[in-house]
Amino acid sequence: MKNMTRLGLGLLLSSSVAMAHAEDVKIGMITTLSGGGSHLGVDVRDGFMLAMEQSGKDDIDVLIQDDANRPDLARSLANEFMQRDDVDILTGIIWSNLAMAVVPAVVRQGTFYLSPNAGPSDLAGRMCHENYFNVAYQNDNLHGAMGAYMREEGYEKPIILAPNYPAGTDALAGFKHLYEGDVIDELYTQMGQTDYAAEIAQIRASDADSLFFFLPGGMGISFMKQWESSGVDIPIFGAAFSFDEILIKAVGSAAIGARNTSLWAYDLDNETNHRFVESFREAYGRTPTLYAAQGFDTANLILSALEVAHPDDQDAFREALRAADFDSVRGEFRFGPNHHPIQDIYVREVVEGDDGQPTNRLLGIAIEDIQDIYYEQCQM
Amino acid sequence: MSVTLLIEQLLNGVQLGTMLFLMASGLTLIFGVMGLINLAHGSFYMVGAYATAAITASTGSFLIGLGAGIVAAALAGALVELIVIRRLYHRPHLDQVLATFALILIFSEGTRLIFGSSPLRLSPPSWLTGFVTLPGDTRYPIYRLVLIGVGVAISIGLYLLISRTRLGMRIRAGESDREMIGALGVNISKLYTLVFALGAGLAGLAGALVGALQSVQVGMGEPVLILAFVVIVIGGIGSIKGALFGALLVGIVDTLGRVYLPIFFRAFMPPSEATGVGAALAAMLIYILMAVILAFKPKGLFAAHD
């Protein structure tokens, strides 16, 4: 059916316009460009487009739409992209709840989906699909890696904190899975909460020796600023989602000293990464975040697979994606059997940069070759 | 559970309450005097925070920034009243909700166009950072104590303004009979603009003060707006006294609920479940409180119009 419409369109257009090459590829990007937390989508887009520009290809058409962080809108955009624009590949979604609303229907209808950020457990496990690839991480990865790191560093009484919603409970579960010890207490906050005085007082009243928290976006900024003025003096740990270059600059000095796990760091030492960071700074005038790195890798993975096959040849294109034969800014990159990365996770520390602004510095590897725990449930 | 933790949490509750009062007092004044439901009140909160962050960054002085934030929010309020709100007083509430909701979208996207989508940086000035040691060896941030102080000062100021000045007399008159004070020769449209700007300025002050504790970002006003509506419904719509009591009640109940409900459930449940159930119930607590109060006092605690 899809090929027939393509053929029909081709016949209609071939006489007048020369654009409808058989080899042309259309990529639809649905990402969050407005509203709260939109700097994630902006960075994914900018990283992605940077790679596209650097490839110098003019037969790839990238269509970009803003989902405003709304699942219903993301879903209708996906339908539009598939039915009206007939895209070959979809990508771009930032948030797990939006991915769950969009991805299953997209891949069932025979379109490829590559995730540049969200990695909900269901899509890695029982709902995995041969046309779904996650180029970023499975949601548990960074939290689990921090659990392993804190165990190794000898912290014995961590207190852990997250918002009370699926990704929050998953984060704490992921942490505990690899921390492998007892935590002193678990605190759940409300989603979107902005005042953390009550939680900070509880942390002070406990005799915890360290704090691990997962508070993405603005919640993390609020928490860190209030933490600094509280006078509680235990080391803090988290995942990179609360410590990207943009967030820590909004937090200011309160972020200094915090350690966080990330799948990538801008000072990671490899040739691809040097070139990426340099060209990104040149093009956009700011240091890339991990989201930009993920967007960049996603684009390069697509480009590498397009060298081998056109997405219309689904089996060949899928094999080419699976091979992941591209230079990742993370160094080594490979997919597990459920099309989720098996990768090293790094630890970074927030320090004061040369310009007096906080910035992340790479400390080392938290855990090598981490793989999610859901791949066994995946049958494709 | 120690007494010091309880005292600290009570202070936290009062601090949250005083900031809610700054939002709720403007909202309730506007509703009381003009009969207008203003969903865009959270946008003035955001305008105050953004202006303060921008001016503080360029001048290096938090106080100048704070002044600029209040002025910017009040100006935005006056402009919005003159251009848009003025046409809505005689329309049904649904039209008002629709128009002020549109204002939220315009303010949010406008702010994003000017300042970008990344959160801005705003911290308390260095002479307000740090903490004081209270009796019982509790450390409490100075900045939060200052917020409580500002909240109390504003409450007293508002009380004096409304009970002792000519403007206050007109506001009270406007609350009880809008048409009559117009007939008595009071320039009603000037009064409306003034009240609207006053409410917006208070929201801007709250946004600026709280923005230094939290993150200054697009959409920061909406969660507070919801709480402020709960406050004025509990307190009685149109009543400043009701807004004060409602705000303190909501602040304290919300704070204590978040701390003590999970602890309470742990007495007879496994810890991880108790935390989840407690946190979920704590999130609902103020709405339950509102439902209970409305069941006994359908017009709120201090209804302005009986």
Image (cartoon, helix red, strand yellow):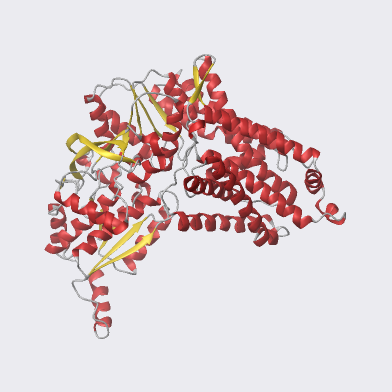
Q: Residue A306, image x and y in percent? A: 16, 63
Vertical arrangement, residue A66 with respect to residue A255, above or below: below
Is residue A250 something that shows in the picture? yes
Q: Position of residue A43 (x, y in %)?
A: 32, 53
Q: Where on the picture, by quarter, is residue A377?
A: top left
**Nearer to us in this view, B204 or A321:** B204
Query: In which image quadrant can residue B193 be found?
Result: bottom right
Q: Position of residue B113 (x, y in %)?
A: 46, 58
Left or right for B126, reference A178: right
Q: Is residue A351 left or right of residue B42?
A: left
A144 or B192, which lies in front? Answer: B192
Q: Residue at the spot x=14%, y=53% of the render?
A: A327
In-image side of A27 versus A208 (left or right): left
Q: Is residue A135 left or right of residue B56?
A: left
In the image, residue B130 sits, relative to residue B133, either above or below, namely below
Q: Reply above or below: A264 against A308.
A: above
Quarter of the N terminus of chain A within the rendering: bottom left
